[in-house]
Image (tube, coloured by chain):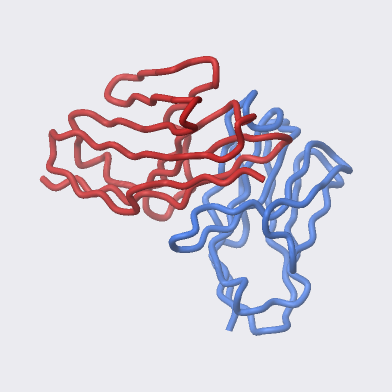
């Protein structure tokens, strides 16, 4: 099955700086790569996703890049704010109906 | 429109007890799934269903049973709880299998097995 690795596990950034989270996947047939944000005590919520026919996608301060050849994708958050503090998960959909998640990155934005 | 509703939010069990985690959605989603979240391990898929009457195993199905008698409900059963099943459980649903539509998560159920 699909195996998704996510780095780093924790990330502390100064408010206003950028944050980058990287993920790799194992199944070359994977074609859908969402990113979820989980705030304390809540369920994960989708923040951005990308499909295998697109190399980059941006939504305001959030962007995702995909390198199919290297089988890795990244989340970029610019101009970080305190409300960006959360746990972020990457995921990949390989063959079949399963969505496989990375282990998560705890992002802390220092004021 | 309540979205994905999970009950109970918290539960403490003794080893060997059985219980059912409830999941209901009011969005007419065909696809439903259960994940468990453990520190350092992310979200791992337990079971999923692509429609009423159809279920299949995920990555970590052992010790759990599911059924899907209606489109709205997807209960997760623990027949004989073990301490290794202490975790936070999330139910998630979408119109169709992930990739075509966004997966929406419930708020989670925290289970402790003593």
Q: What is chain B's hue in the picture?
A: blue
Task: Where is residue B5? Give x, y as percent.
Answer: 61, 47
Q: On screen, B97 above or below B20? A: above
Quarter of the image with the N terminus of chain B in it: top right
Along the viewing direction, whichever of A12 and B68 lies nearer the viewer: A12
Which residue is drawn at the image coordinates 73% and 31% (left, top)?
B28
Which residue is drawn at the image coordinates 83% and 52% (left, top)?
B67
Q: Is residue A102 left or right of residue B35?
A: left
Task: Where is residue A67? Give x, y as percent.
Answer: 44, 25
Which residue is drawn at the image coordinates 74% and 65% (left, top)?
B62
Quarter of image, res B98? top right
Q: Residue furthest front?
A: A69
Task: Where is residue B11? Give x, y as percent.
Answer: 58, 71
Q: How many marks?
A: 0
Task: Where is residue B80? Give x, y as percent.
Answer: 75, 77
Q: On screen, A96 above or below B36? A: above
Q: Is residue A58 left or right of residue B46?
A: left
Quarter of the image with the C terminus of chain B in it: bottom right
Q: Is residue A98 left or right of residue B40?
A: right
Q: What is chain A's hue in the picture?
A: red
Along the viewing direction, whichever of A65 and A67 lies nearer the viewer: A67
Quarter of image, res A73? top left
Along the viewing direction, whichever of B69 and B37 lies nearer the viewer: B37
Q: On screen, A28 above or below A43? A: above
Which residue is drawn at the image coordinates 47% and 47% (left, top)?
A5
């Amino acid at each position: 099955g699909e195996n998704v690795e996510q780095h780093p596990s924790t990330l502390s950034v100064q408010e206003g700086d950028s944050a980058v989270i990287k993920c790799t996947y194992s199944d070359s047939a994977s074609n859908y790569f969402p990113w979820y944000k989980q705030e304390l005590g809540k369920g994960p919520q989708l923040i951005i996703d990308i499909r295998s026919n697109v190399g980059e996608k941006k939504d305001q301060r959030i962007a995702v890049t995909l390198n199919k050849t290297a089988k890795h994708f990244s989340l970029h958050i610019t101009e970080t704010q305190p409300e960006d503090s959360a746990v972020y998960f990457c995921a990949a959909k390989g063959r079949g109906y399963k969505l496989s998640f990375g282990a998560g990155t705890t992002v802390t934005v220092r004021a | 429109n309540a979205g994905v509703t999970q009950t109970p939010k918290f539960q403490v069990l003794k080893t060997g007890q059985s219980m059912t985690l409830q999941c209901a959605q009011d969005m007419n989603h065909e696809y439903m799934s259960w994940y468990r979240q453990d520190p350092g391990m992310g979200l791992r898929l337990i079971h999923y269903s692509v429609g009423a009457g159809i279920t299949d195993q995920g990555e970590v199905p052992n010790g759990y049973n599911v059924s899907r008698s209606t489109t709205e409900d997807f209960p997760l059963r623990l027949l004989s709880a073990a301490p290794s099943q202490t975790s936070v459980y999330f139910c998630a649903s979408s119109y169709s299998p992930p990739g075509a539509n966004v997966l929406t998560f419930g708020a989670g159920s925290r289970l402790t097995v003593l």
